[in-house]
Image: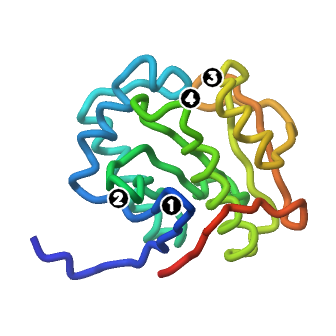
Amino acid sequence: MNNAFITSVPYLRTERLVLREYRREDFDAFAAHVADPVSAAHLVPVDRQAAWRIFCSQAGLWLIHGAGWWAVEDKETGQLVGNVGAFFREDSTVMELGWNTYRAFWGRGYANEAAAAVVNHALEIRREPKVRALIAAANESSLRVAKRLGFTYEADTEIYGKAVGIYTRERGSPVVSVPGESCTS
């Protein structure tokens, strides 16, 4: 296959992780994650066909907004451990962040580390004035990540028929430090 049109996804590096573009070979792990009712409890679990559409849509956000989702890879092993995004919804001018760690890698701090790199990228590199995360009240692990990253509750809203809280952080609030973080295009 010839990919004549290519866009650049910035690589973000932390002490343990590389945040990079989605690749075709990442799809099986992604599809398994979004189909797993435990992993996707705070998302909307989907079948493989819908997973492919979501995967491609997330990758394609880079073309539309110059922002999107990264695959999160363990530097040492090269294993895909999750994904993290900084993107815009159709009706929003505020950049939204999202993070997912694949179940086999829960409890290792990967979501916190990857999300911290993306918060820094959004606020300090892209100079977004504000970022937000939509988090269900029952999603205790994501609420802990958001709190560690300095997000504060703003309001309630609904997405895909589910109630979620809007958590925000503004540029100028305390900077998240990610040991060994660097950014390259």
- For marks 1 and 3, give the CA distance: 23 Å
Q: Which of pointers 4 and 1 lies earlier in the amino acid sequence?
A: 1
* Distance (Cα) linking label 2 and label 4: 24 Å
Q: Which residue is mark 2?
A: 22
Cβ atoms at labels 3 and 2 below 8 Å apart: no
Q: Nearer the viewer, mark 2 or mark 4?
A: 2
Whole-angstrom CA distance, mark 3 to mark 2, is 27 Å
Q: Where residue 51 sits in the image (x, y, percent)?
A: 32, 38
The amino acid on which the numbered mark 4 sits, given as a three-letter code, is Tyr
Mark 3 or 2, nearer chain start: 2
Q: In terms of sequence position, does the residue under pointer 2 or pointer 4 come before the other?
A: 2
Residue 162 image label = 3
Which residue is at 86% across, 37% downward? 153
1 or 3: mark nearer the eye:
1
- Which residue lies under the disc numbered 1? 68
Do the numbered discs 3 and 4 sit on residues whose CB atoms are within 8 Å? yes
